[in-house]
Structure formats: structure tokens, C-alpha cells
Image (cartoon, rainbow, N blue to C red):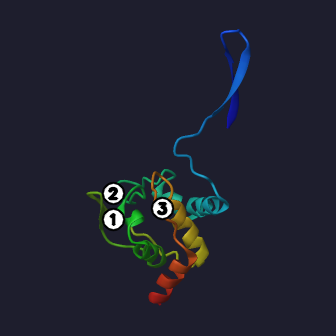
Amino acid sequence: MFFIAGCRNENSKIHSTDITVEKKNAKIETPEYLEGKKYFNQYCMACHMQDGMGVPGMNPPLVKTSWVLGDKARLIGVVLNGLSGDIEINGELYSNSMGSFATLEDKEIALVLSYVRQSFGNDAGPVTQEEVAKVRASIK
């Protein structure tokens, strides 16, 4: 965003200066990012919450965890297979089961996981449709 700032010089004449104001850490909300957000809101938000912090003791956070930022194949596998049993994340135990979302298309899974890996303070690379297809083929 640009705005004009008026300044007076020693001759009391006003001159203008362009100043750029940028929002720190602003995300560029591409159509893919917004579509991933839509899928997150539809399929994930009820358990992992709007801020990605989850529910203590039940649903794990998606914020700066090795499960989200680490091995993409493991993360894709969780979405395709679901997850049950106790898991420990950042020193806290979570025990709620997550059902499989294998009915989603590869593109939808890639978009939602890319959104998660690039939201909530996370700064990881996107997940591609091809990566999802590869993991899906390996678990059939």
C-alpha cells in the first residue's frame, strides 16, 4: 500500500515522498492457498481448531511440529490412513483417533496439507499432487 506523506522544507514548500507500508510476514493468498484453507475449514478445523493449536490431550496441534514440518510422506500417510493410538507431540500425549480421509482426491489432500505447512507460523514447502499419488499407491 502506498500513501503520500507531506513534508515542509526550509522554504516552507510542501513536497511529497512515497512510503511503502508492508505487513510483516504477510502471506500471499494464492488461489491454491485459499482452496487449501477451504478444505482445512471443512475437514480439519473441528478437531485441530481454527488456529491449528488442536485440543490438549485429544487432538494434536499443527503448529511447528515435526509431524507437519517433517517427512511429507508420513504426513500424507496420516491423512490417507488415519491415526489411532497415543502419540506424543512436543512432550504432550494425544489420544484421540483421526479417521482416514482417503476419499479425498490427491489434489485436495495436497492443497490442504500445503495450507497447513504454510500456515499457523509454519514455513514448510508445499505438498504436491504427485507426492500424494505416490504415497497412495504405496499403501494399496
Tell me if 36 is positioned left or right of 124 in this view: right
Which amino acid is tagged 2? Gly
- Toward the left, the furthest residue is 91
Vertical side of 77 occupied by 115: above or below = above
Residue nearer the viewer, 22 or 121: 22
Where's residue 100, x and y in %? 48, 76
**C-alpha span from label 1 to label 3:** 22 Å
* Numbered label attached to residue 57: 2
* Numbered label attached to residue 95: 1
Q: Residue at x 40, y 63 (%)?
A: 69
Q: Picture quarter containing residue 56? A: bottom left
Crowd tier of the residue under label 2, counting other residues whose Cα lies within 10 Å: few below 14, some 14–19, many 20 or above: some
Residue nearer the viewer, 74 or 47: 74
Tell me if 56 is positioned left or right of 127 in this view: left
Secondary structure of residue under mark 3: helix
Which amino acid is tagged 1? Ser
- Toward the bottom, the furthest residue is 140
Where's residue 117, x and y in %? 48, 61
Which of marks 1 and 2 precedes in the sequence? 2
The answer to whether the residue labelled 2 contacts the one labelled 1, judged by CB atoms less than 8 Å apart, is: yes
Where's residue 111, x and y in %? 58, 67
Q: Nearer the viewer, mark 3 or mark 2?
A: 3
Secondary structure of residue under mark 1: loop
- Toward the top, the furthest residue is 11
Vertical side of 121 occupied by 72: above or below = below
Which amino acid is tagged 3? Arg
Vertical side of 20 occupied by 47: above or below = below
**C-alpha span from label 2 to label 1:** 6 Å
The answer to whether the residue labelled 1 contacts the one labelled 3, judged by CB atoms less than 8 Å apart, is: no
**C-alpha span from label 3 to label 2:** 22 Å
In this view of the protein, can residue 104 be seen by the observer? Answer: no
Crowd tier of the residue under label 1, counting other residues whose Cα lies within 10 Å: few below 14, some 14–19, many 20 or above: some
